[in-house]
Image (tube, rainbow, N blue to C red):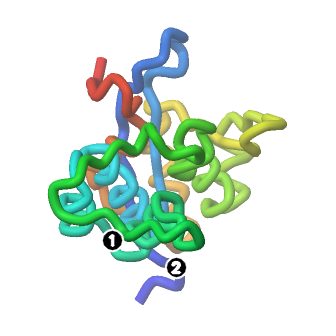
Amino acid sequence: MAPYEPIWWARTEVGYEDEKRRDQFVALPESLAKTALSWRAVLKVTTFGELRAGVEPAIVAEILEWAVDEDSGDTPPMGEEPFDLSAFGPYQDVDWPPDPHATMLAALPAEIVDNFGTVERTTMHGDTVRFPGRLAEAICDELVATGYTVEEVPELAEVLQDPAVERRL
């Protein structure tokens, strides 16, 4: 048994204008990758019924905390009531869902970040790391050499996609 949680990874092209930042690599421990994919699922629902049916209960509860002001007598939205994530303050402020680049910085070994990544320091949204997609094989080899198991999960690439555009270049 490996001493670490398995790492899921993917390579993707992201819709950035800066050509050097388009080809990217994402790698997250399996549990964080599953959660990141669930957050991504939130971006695709159009009703509260779809939200409740297709998204992790913990994420639904977090969203309902924003959507319902119990002190003013609001009741939780149900069924076919429209759901629009862009109406929520944390999403508008780019504070939610968590940036996978920040999650990678916190979750991956420092040696991987230092040897392969570019750390970007920001005041508003915290520090992040980006990995060039062309380094995917080398990063995975280093993770395996460090004791991790790695698994390519192509749908994980979605967590880096621009939710407003919904396309890959």
Q: Is label 1 or label 2 in front?
A: 1
Circle on res. 97? none
Q: Is residue 10 above or below residue 107?
A: above
Q: Amino acid at mark 2?
A: Tyr
Q: Which residue is mark 1?
A: 56
Q: In this image, 4 relative to 53: left or right?
A: right
Question: Which residue ends up furthest to the front in the rendered image?
Answer: 73
Residue at (39, 70) in percent of width and height: 75
Residue at (16, 55) in percent of width and height: 80
Residue at (46, 32) in percent of width and height: 24
Q: Amino acid at mark 1?
A: Glu
Question: Which residue ends up furthest to the left in the rendered image?
Answer: 80
Category of crowding for the residue at label 2, using alpha-carbon neighbours closer than 10 angstroms: few (below 14), some (14–19), many (at least 20) = few
Q: Which residue is mark 2?
A: 4
Residue at (25, 47) in percent of width and height: 82
Give how far apart the Cα atoms at labels 1 and 2 are: 24 Å
Question: Which residue ends up furthest to the bottom in the rendered image?
Answer: 1
Residue 40's spot in the image, x, y percent?
A: 35, 50
Residue 11's spot in the image, x, y percent?
A: 36, 38
Image quarter (top left, top right, bottom left or bottom right) of the C terminus: top left
Residue 155's spot in the image, x, y percent?
A: 25, 48
Category of crowding for the residue at label 1, using alpha-carbon neighbours closer than 10 angstroms: few (below 14), some (14–19), many (at least 20) = some
Q: In this image, 106 relative to 15: left or right?
A: right
Q: Which one is in front, 97 or 76?
A: 76
Q: In this image, 23 relative to 71: left or right?
A: left
For marks 1 and 2 on the same chain, the one whose residue lies earlier in the sequence: 2
Q: Visible in this render: residue 45?
A: no
Q: Visible in this render: residue 36?
A: yes
